[in-house]
Image: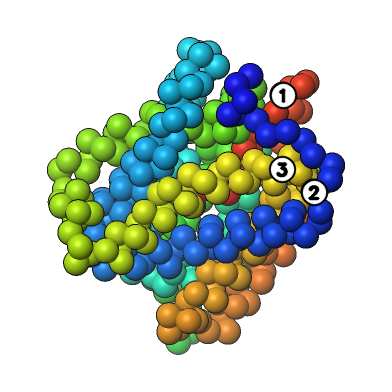
Amino acid sequence: MSSITTFPKSRTDSPLIIWGLLLFLALIWGSSFILIKKSLQVYSVAEVAAGRVFLAFVFFLPILLRSYKEVPRPLFKYLFLSGLLGYLLPAFLFAQAAKHISSAMAGTLNALSPMFTMLIGTLFFGQRPRWMQVLGLLIALGGALMLILTRSGSSLSVANPYALFAVAATVFYGTNINIVARHLSGLSAVVSTAWIFAGVGPLALGILFSTSFFGKMSNPAYLLPSSFLLCLGVLSSGLMSILFNRLIQLSSAVFASSVTYLMPIVALSWGILDHEAVGVQQWMGTLVILVGVYLINRKRKMYPPPAQIPPSPKEEPIV
């Protein structure tokens, strides 16, 4: 295995470093939703969505060039499917949602990903959930309904139908995580993530050619929103994927997956700082979702990992 695809396991790293990595991941991934919102002030939905995927593809190019011999050809179809369901389509859905809902709500709804991971794994991938996970699913679903539905007089109605775009993105996330866990766990996390972008990166580039993306990126007047979009692609989708893999190796997949609980807090905090309306119902819905996600993730095992294989990104939350 190439030295660029794995990190040495270290027993000397302090808990301070491990917790620092976790908090840094939560800060960057939880900030993705406010970055999407700010990027949309100049860029279109297609430019934000395809742009962040293309920029992540560019970030991974050095790894792609050095690891092409490590990927068996039969896996390419799953890598492309993973890129489509785990990155490109959710990027469009979250960008569309962000034009109409607050970044705080988008960040909270992103926490539904583990719920759909379990549900889709049960329905289509032969997993058998425990009763505690079923209870967690129902609780998380109740929290989501608290966010999406509002009371108008004596009846309930959808507060903002565009919130359903964010929910649909988490359905794709849940499907992708099951695909990665079932078919791509034999690859190291860095290599598999790089080759996931190899499939959808050129597709995103083709989309961008039909927009004014490159003209805006080269325009000094758009420096700030372009910087936000660059952070989305290179930092959030690119570098953080590698650091997440490192965190798993220094601690455990269970500990690393706890970033799921911190991201909504970061998203809500950014929403408040940006003067978004964050009411009691949204705080309660967030809390209920996180309780449900905790029960779903409690001692969860998706698929037995192959012997002597580096950790896979099956627990990774993709924003």
Residue that label 2 marks: 13
Q: Which of marks 1 and 2 is nearer the N terminus?
A: 2
Question: Which quadrant of the structure image shows residue 274?
Answer: bottom left
Q: Are marks 1 and 2 in contact (CB under 8 Å)?
A: no
Q: Is mark 3 on a helix, strand or loop?
A: helix
Question: How many C-alpha atoms fall within 10 Å of the one at disc 1: few (<14), some, or many (≥20)?
Answer: few
Asked which quadrant contains residue 217, the reply is: bottom left
Q: Is residue 282 above or below residue 257?
A: below
Q: Please identify, in this view, whether the residue under mark 2 or under mark 3 is nearer the observer.
A: 2
SS under mark 2 = loop
Position of residue 41 in the picture relative to residue 135 (left or right): left
Amino acid type, mark 2: Asp
Query: How many numbered badges does the structure rendering display?
Result: 3
Is 2 in front, or is 208?
2
**In this picture, residue 46 sits left or right of residue 138:** left
Q: Residue 54 is drawn in which quadrant?
A: top left
Q: Mark 2–mark 3 contact, CB under 8 Å?
A: no
Instruction: From the viewer's side, name the closer residue of 74 and 20.
Output: 20
Query: Closer to the N terminus: mark 3 or mark 1?
Result: 3
Mark 2 Cα-neighbour bin, 10 Å: few <14, some 14–19, many ≥20: few
Distance in Å between CA atoms under marks 2 and 3:
13 Å
Q: Which of the pair 62/267 is nearer the observer?
A: 62
Q: Residue drawn 81% across and 54% down?
A: 14
173, above or below 19, in the image: above
Rounded to the nearest whole Å, what is the CA distance between mark 1 and mark 2?
A: 22 Å
Q: Mark 3 points at which residue?
A: 248
**Amino acid bearing label 3:** Ile
Closer to us: mark 1 or mark 2? Answer: 2
Residue shown at 43%/48% (left/top)?
234
Image quarter of the N terminus: top right
Q: How far apart are marks 3 and 1 (CA)?
A: 13 Å
Q: Can residue 26 be seen in this view?
A: yes
